[in-house]
Image (spheres, rainbow, N blue to C red):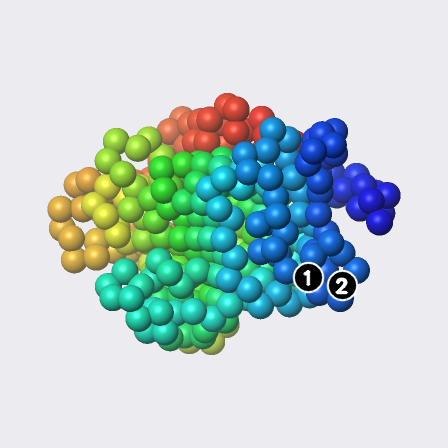
């Protein structure tokens, strides 16, 4: 079994650092009992706290009906699926079901990440509750988190990219309805498809004051449900210092000409930073964007690199993924 796993790791190009340490063991999860665990959470709970080397948990294809938490002490974990289409983590909590008052949204996650240096790859994370209000699929609070080749599925509040840390999303499909990418993190979205399922708002950043970068979308494609989705905003400020920038992105016809909304917060027009550079597609309309947004120059856009946004050390790790 170990030889098969090593061959798979080699083929997908993942680091195998943890195999060098006999006190740390990579793990296989399989619903049919052919792995070390049948539950993803069980494999996480059985992982060493604060390991020196990376632990890879390989998850075989299957539908894992679990509500999962990567604890703060579960650093240096890679959760890797056999395939993003068929390795599915799903749960169905939503605001009214949780019923814990005005902050119920934050308890609705399917997968919660509180640990630093976490990698999620080749997996679908789904909130299956339907269009019933706030319902988070993936919630990330920590630093140096990379989400690679994943599908993040839901409706309102699909992805909570928050905290003060750095997050990287590459080759991901992210869908939702209202504010479906929201939170305070510095997050770089690289070559992702951002899919709107309803007329509403894509982003709702709550970037802290004096943070250099908030949400950065680079080489992303903004798509929409084919029928009935024609009025979608790029974003609105959950908090007044929100920062969201689109660089070299293709925008579908569903994106409204004005682009951005102030969420009935006129003061945010002076404090938020919303910008684009070199947008293409039917939704690209620089001359009609709200006056308080920005069209970046080529020189201004060049500062939005992975290294600048996420830091040189994290960018080195990303280049190895």
Residue 260: image location, x then y, percent: 29, 53
Q: Nearer the viewer, residue 75 or 192?
A: 75
Q: Is residue 160 left or right of residue 194?
A: left
Q: Is residue 78 left or right of residue 130?
A: right
Residue corresponding to mark 1: 38
Indicate whether 305 appears above or below 201.
Answer: above
Seen at 45% across and 36% down, the residue is 143
Residue 99: image location, x then y, percent: 30, 71
Which quarter of the rendering shows the C terminus? Answer: top right
Seen at 49% across and 53% down, the residue is 69
Judged from the image, the secondary structure of the residue bearing numbered disc 1 is loop
Judged from the image, the secondary structure of the residue bearing numbered disc 2 is loop
Seen at 15% across and 53% down, the residue is 265
Q: Is residue 152 visible?
A: no
Q: Is residue 186 left or right of residue 241?
A: right
Q: In the rendering, which numbered label is found on residue 33?
A: 2
Q: Residue at the far left: name it.
A: 267
| Residues at discs 1 and 2 in contact (Cβ within 8 Å) | yes
Are there few (<14), some (14-19), or many (20+) residues within 10 Å of tag 1?
some
Gap between marks 1 and 2 measured at Cα: 6 Å
Chain-order first, disc 1 or disc 2 = 2
């Amino acid at each position: 079994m170990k030889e098969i796993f090593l061959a798979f790791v080699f083929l997908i190009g993942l680091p195998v650092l943890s195999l060098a340490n006999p006190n740390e063991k990579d793990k296989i999860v399989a619903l049919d009992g052919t792995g070390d665990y049948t539950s993803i959470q069980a494999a996480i709970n059985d992982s060493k706290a604060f390991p020196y080397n990376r632990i890879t948990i390989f998850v075989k294809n299957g539908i894992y009906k679990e509500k999962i938490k990567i604890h703060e002490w579960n650093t240096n974990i890679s959760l890797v699926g056999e395939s993003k289409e068929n390795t599915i983590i799903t749960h169905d909590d939503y605001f009214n079901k949780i019923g814990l008052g005005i902050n119920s949204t934050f308890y609705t996650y399917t997968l919660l990440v509180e640990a630093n240096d976490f990698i999620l790859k080749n997996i679908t994370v789904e909130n299956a509750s339907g269009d019933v209000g706030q319902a988070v699929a993936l919630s990330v609070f920590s630093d140096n988190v990379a989400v690679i080749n994943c599908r993040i599925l839901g409706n309102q509040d699909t992805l909570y990219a928050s905290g003060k840390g750095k997050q990287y999303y590459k080759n991901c499909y992210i869908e939702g309805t209202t504010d479906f990418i929201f939170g305070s993190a510095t997050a770089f979205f690289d070559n992702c498809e951002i899919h709107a399922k309803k007329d509403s708002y894509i982003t709702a950043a709550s970037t802290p004051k004096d943070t250099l970068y908030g949400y950065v979308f680079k080489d992303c494609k903004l798509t929409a449900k084919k029928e009935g989705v024609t009025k979608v905003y790029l974003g609105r400020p959950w908090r007044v210092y929100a920062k969201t920038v689109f660089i070299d992105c293709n925008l579908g016809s569903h994106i409204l000409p004005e682009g951005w909304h102030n969420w009935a917060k006129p003061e945010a027009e002076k404090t938020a930073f919303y910008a684009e550079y070199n947008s293409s597609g039917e939704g690209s309309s620089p001359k009609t964007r709200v006056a308080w947004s920005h069209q970046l120059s080529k020189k201004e856009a060049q500062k939005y690199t992975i290294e600048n946004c996420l830091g040189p050390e994290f960018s080195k790790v990303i280049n190895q993924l």
